[in-house]
Structures are given as C-alpha cells and as structure tokens.
C-alpha cells in the first residue's frame, strides 16, 4: 500500500510527533509499504525528502481578499484563529495540488490535519487520525498562564475555535487512535468525539535504544539505586508537557517519603527553569536531569 502520514504542524521538529511519524514510517516500510510524510515547512507545505512542495505565498493574495472583518468576522477577529485557518486552507490546497488519489490510506497526526484532509480527499480512501494531545487544552493552559486579567480563557474565541476543531477532526475520521484512557475521556466528554471510532494504542518505548542513549549520557551505564524507586519521565522539557505539575507532585511526595528518585530524560527551553524550581522546592538531590543522546 501507499500511505500518507500528514500533520498540520512543522516537520521535521524536535518533539514526540516527528519521532512518532518517523518510527511509523520505518515500521510500515519494513512491512513493504511505501510511506510519504507531509507537513508544514513554515513558508510551504511539502512532502518530506521530495521535491513536492507548495509555497504558501501562492495563496496569500486570495486569503487577504477572502478573510476580512466584513466577509469572515470570526476568523479575522483574532490573529491566532486567522493564522490557523489560513494555514488549514493552505494545507487543503497543497494536498489537492499534490493529489490524494495516489494513496490507499491517509493517517493524520492531529485534528487540524484531519479536518483539512476530509474536505478534499477521495471518499473511498480511509482516514485514520492519531490525536497525540488535546490542542484545545494546550491552548487553554497557555491562555491561563499568560492572561493579564480575570477573564476565563474558555470564553475566548481561540478556545472556542480549537474546541470546535477537536470535535470536527475526530468526527470526520474513520478511526481515531489515542494513547490513553485519560485522553479518551477528555475527547469524548469535553469535545464529543465519537467513542465508537476510538481505538486505544498505548505508546511503546524502544528499550534497546533507550538503554544505549543512557550509556551515552556519561559514558557509563546509569544504574538504578538499590534502595529507591525510580520514576522516569521521557519528555521534551517545555511548558505544554506539564513537567511543572510533576515537580509539584514530587515536592509533596518528598515531605512524606524520600525512598525515590525521578529521572527527567530529555531537554527543552524550560530545563534551567525546572532545575531552579527543584532547588527552590528542596528536591534537587532527588531529581536528575538526563539529556537524551541522539
């Protein structure tokens, strides 16, 4: 089969989504399938490692004419919404130009990609969507973290837009792949995703690669303390991953017991902030920051 893995977001990118797409591609190719990766290149949408691309500038004049306060007031009102919708339209037009009829199955990696693909794909081609995280909840948390007034983030146009995208992207998919019961509860009860289309496939960890990476950190294997339980988080150290929530929980745990260590495996823009937070909480001796080796 010829399969398309598509995302609304930038590729390649330092993060779990890109890693997931690469691993799925490698696994499918080992089974004899042909796999293309499609995503955002900031100024274009394109097929990764090919000459198939569509610069966004081709559509700019049309969007400037079509998306105005008079013709599309809700879209034009907020720059986040306008940018997201403009990029979604660019994605649709780019995929239409490249041609989706060449694929046997399409695997979207987010709800925005699913919503775009559904509008222009041939009806007989199945659309599967993996939802790796809730875009709406991420936006809500960002608004809450950056707000300058007492306004409820869920009353904002941005929240309402992404909430509608969660429903639209999941409802147009033939199957929705989720990694946890928690995310299923969120998608079904908060965003009305159709529960009968959801399939749970928990993420797996490449143990040999993980062990090899651990040895590369210091040149020697990192050994588990004999008298302590080890809590491991493999994640990019950025706000949306919720590491600050984990550290606050560990601070409370540390008051009651100290028979544990937490290993944070990864790197990111919040690393030094989280290291300082550990020092302020007095748990710096119990939390180890381990940078993943390539």
Image (tube, helix red, strand yellow):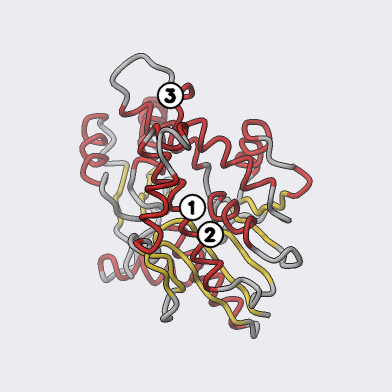
Residue at the spot x=59%, y=51% of the render? 115
Q: Are marks 2 and 1 in contact (CB under 8 Å)?
A: yes
Q: Is residue 46 left or right of residue 191?
A: left
Residue ID at (34%, 28%)? 145
Circle 1: is it few (<14), some (14-19), or many (20+) Cα within 10 Å? some
Could you say whether the residue bearing mark 2 is in a helix, strand or loop?
helix
Residue 251 screen position, x and y as percent: 35, 30
N-term mark: 3 or 2? 2
Numbered disc 3: secondary structure: helix
Secondary structure under badge 1? helix
The residue mark sitting in front, 3 or 1, is 1
170 and 132: which is toward the camera? 170
Position above or below: 77 against 48? above
For mark 3, what is the residue?
153
Q: Position of residue 234 (x, y in %)?
A: 42, 54
The residue most toward the bottom is: 32
Q: Nearer the viewer, residue 93 or 130?
A: 93
Say which label, 3 or 1, has the lower sequence index: 1
**Which residue is drawn at the image coordinates 69% and 50% (left, top)?**
172
Q: Which residue is mark 1?
A: 88
**Label 2 vs label 1: CA separation?**
6 Å
Q: Determine the residue located farthest toward the right in the rendered image.
A: 196
Q: Where does label 2 land, which residue?
A: 92
- In the image shown, does 257 or 146 lie closer to the viewer? 146
* Quadrant that contains the N terminus: bottom right
Res. 109 mark: none
Q: Residues within 10 Å of mark 3 (few under 14, many from 20)?
A: many
Alpha carbon separation for disc pair 3 and 1 = 23 Å
Q: Nearer the viewer, residue 200 or 161?
A: 161
């Amino acid at each position: 089969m010829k399969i398309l893995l598509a995302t609304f977001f930038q590729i390649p990118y330092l993060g779990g989504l890109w890693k997931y797409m690469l691993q799925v591609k490698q696994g499918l190719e080992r089974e004899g399938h042909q796999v293309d990766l499609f995503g955002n290149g900031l100024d274009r949408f394109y097929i990764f490692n090919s000459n198939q691309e569509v610069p966004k500038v081709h559509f700019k004049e049309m969007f400037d004419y079509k998306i105005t306060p008079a013709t599309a007031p809700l879209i034009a009102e907020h720059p986040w919404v306008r940018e997201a919708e403009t990029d979604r339209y660019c994605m649709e037009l780019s995929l239409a130009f490249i041609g989706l009829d060449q694929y046997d199955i399409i695997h979207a990696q987010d709800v925005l990609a699913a919503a775009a693909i559904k509008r222009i794909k041939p009806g007989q081609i199945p659309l599967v969507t993996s939802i790796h995280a809730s875009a709406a909840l991420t936006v809500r948390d960002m608004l809450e973290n950056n707000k300058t007034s007492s306004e409820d983030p869920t009353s904002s146009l941005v929240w309402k837009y992404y909430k509608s995208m969660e429903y639209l992207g999941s409802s147009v998919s033939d199957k929705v792949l989720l990694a946890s019961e928690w995310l299923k509860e969120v998608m079904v009860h908060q965003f009305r995703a159709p529960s009968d289309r959801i399939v749970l496939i928990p993420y797996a960890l490449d143990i040999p690669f993980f062990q090899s990476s651990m040895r590369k950190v210091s040149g020697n294997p990192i050994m588990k303390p004999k008298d302590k339980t080890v809590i491991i988080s493999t994640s990019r150290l950025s706000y949306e991953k919720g590491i600050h929530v984990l550290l606050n929980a560990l601070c409370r745990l540390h008051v009651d017991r100290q028979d544990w260590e937490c290993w944070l495996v990864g790197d990111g823009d919040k690393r030094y902030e989280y290291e300082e937070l550990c020092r302020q909480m007095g748990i710096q001796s119990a939390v180890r920051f381990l940078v993943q080796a390539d």
